[in-house]
Image: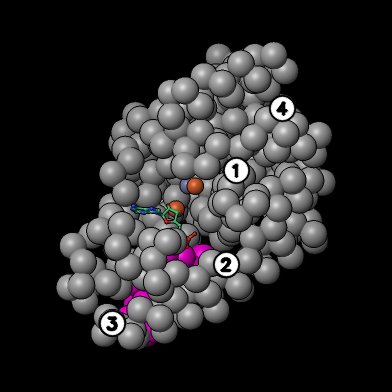
Amino acid sequence: MSDSLPSPADLHVHSNRSDGTESPREVVRQARAAGLGLIGLTDHDTVSGWEEAASAARETGMGLLPGAEFSSKHRGGGVHVLGYLFDPTDAPLASLMSRVRDDRLGRAERLVGNLSRDYPLTWDDVLAQRSGDATIGRPHIADALVAAGHVADREEAFRGPLHPAGRYYVGHLAPKPADVVRALVGAGGVAIIAHPAGRGMLSDEAIRELLDAGLAGFELGHRENSAQGAARLREIADARNLIVTGSSDYHGAGKPNVLGEHTTDPVMLERIVHAGTGAEPVFG
Ligand code: AMP
Ligand code: FE
Ligand code: FE
Ligand code: ZN
C-alpha cells in the first residue's frame, strides 16, 4: 500500500496562518512546483489553514496531511510537538491550542513594549506583518523590525533584539510536552517530536515519559538536528520500532529552509496515516 501514497512527502511546512510567508494555497502550489507529492501543513498552534490547503491540494492533485506544531516547554526549554491527523474539534486539544494562541498575543505585545524603549516600533507595526488571525510570534515582530529598517532580516532580529537571553525577551505560556502528546493521542492524532536533536536535547528520562504518554516518534531528518543527537535518537527509534520522519520546516521567505530538503520514507508515512484517526488526509 505504501506504493500508492503520494511521494516524496515533506511533513513539516508552515504557511502565513502562523509564521510562514505564503498562504496555504500558495504553499501547496510551491510544493507541487518543487516536485513533492504530499506535504504536512503544520502551522504553530493552529489548524486555520487546513481547509484552504485541502481544497488547494484537491485542485492541484497534491497530497495533504493536516497537522500542527504545538508549542510546549520542558524544564524551561522549548519543545515543539508535531501532531498529525488529530480531530480539531476535540475540546481538550482545541482549548489547549486556543489558550496558547491567546497568551502569545499578550506576550508579543509585552515584547514589543520592551523593544520600543530602544527601537521605535508600535504594536500596529507588528499587526501589519500578521495575516488575519495568524498565530503570532517573534517572526512577526522580526518582520516589523525589518520593515522599520532596524535589522536586515529575521535572522538578524533573532540573533539580536529577539534573542531569549536578551533584555527584551518575554516567554509565552506553553504546556508540558507530555500533556500535548496525551491531548493529541486523545484526539486521534499522531505525535512526533520536531527537530528533537536541535538546540535542546531531551534526556532519556524525558523521552521515556513522552513514550509512555503515547509519543509515536521523532523528526530525525531536519537541518537543526545534530548528527550525534540524531544518531542517539535513531538507536532509540530502532529499538522501539518508532516512527521517524524527515522534513524541511519550510517558512516561505521567512527562513532559508527549502521545500523537500528532507523527506519522509513512504513506509513511515503509511504508519502515520494508519495510526491517525481524527482527521482525513487528502490524496490529491
Ligand atoms: P516564538 O514561538 O514566537 O518564540 O518564535 C519562534 C519561531 O521563530 C519558530 O517557530 C521559528 O520558526 C522562528 N525562528 C526562530 N529562529 C529563527 C531565525 N533565526 N530566523 C527565522 N525564524 C526563526
Ligand atoms: Fe516557525
Ligand atoms: Fe519548530
Ligand atoms: Zn516548524
For the residue marked with disc 4, what is the amino acid?
A: His
Q: Nearer the viewer, residue 27 or 140?
A: 140
Circles 4, 3 touching at the beta carbon (< 8 Å)? no
N-terminal-most mark, 2 or 1: 1
Residue under numbered circle 1: 82
Give the CA separation, mark 2 to mark 4: 34 Å
Please state, as top left, top right, bottom left or bottom right, where the N terminus lies in the image: top right
- Residue 256 placement (x, y as % from top left): 28, 44
For the residue marked with disc 2, what is the amino acid?
A: His
N-terminal-most mark, 2 or 3: 3
User: Circle 3 sits in a helix, a strand or a loop, which is it?
Assistant: loop
Label 1 CB less than 8 angstroms from ligand 4: yes
Q: Residue at x 61, y 37 (%)?
A: 202
Magenta span of residues: 123-138
Residue under numbered circle 2: 172
For the residue marked with disc 3, what is the amino acid?
A: Asp
Give the CA separation, mark 3 to mark 1: 36 Å
Q: Is residue 214 above or below residue 265?
A: below
N-terminal-most mark, 4 or 3: 3
Can residue 237 be spotted in the picture? yes
Residue under numbered circle 3: 118
